[in-house]
Amino acid sequence: MEGFYKRFFHTLVVFCLKYMGDIEKSKNIAQDCFYKMLTSDFKVLSEENTKGFLYKTARNLCLSELRHQTVVDNFNELHKN
């Protein structure tokens, strides 16, 4: 597992950065991807399916975070006055 982390962490951060525009959020999401891999029923069959799992998870987590941020921004805007 450590090998996958070393191999993919940096590229996952860069991938997430394209969605998030924030390095710290991107690092957190990349770490969450590995946590999800460890705590799910995911079976490491090959590097290719592991890479696919990590990138799909990263995309989904980024989109979820962006949706959440939109809700927070809208709420703050409504309650500004």
Image (spheres, grey):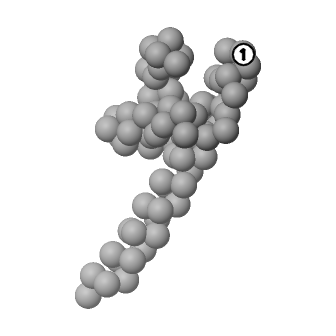
Which x, y percent locates residue 75?
39, 77
Which x, y percent locates residue 10?
44, 20
User: Callout 1: helix, strand or loop?
Assistant: loop
Q: Which residue carries the number 1 mark?
A: 46
User: Is 63 situated above or below 70?
Assistant: above
Tally the marks.
1
Q: Residues within 10 Å of mark 1 (few under 14, many from 20)?
A: few
Which x, y percent locates residue 4?
53, 17
Q: Is residue 79 left or right of residue 59?
A: left
Asked whether 13 or 57 is in front, the reply is: 57
Could you tell me which residue is drawn at 27 percent across and 82 percent down? 80
Residue 17 seen in the current view = no
Q: Is residue 41 left or right of residue 7?
A: right
Could you tell me which residue is drawn at 61 percent across and 40 percent down? 40
Residue 63 seen in the current view = yes
Q: Amino acid at mark 1?
A: Ser
Q: Quadrant of residue 36?
A: top right
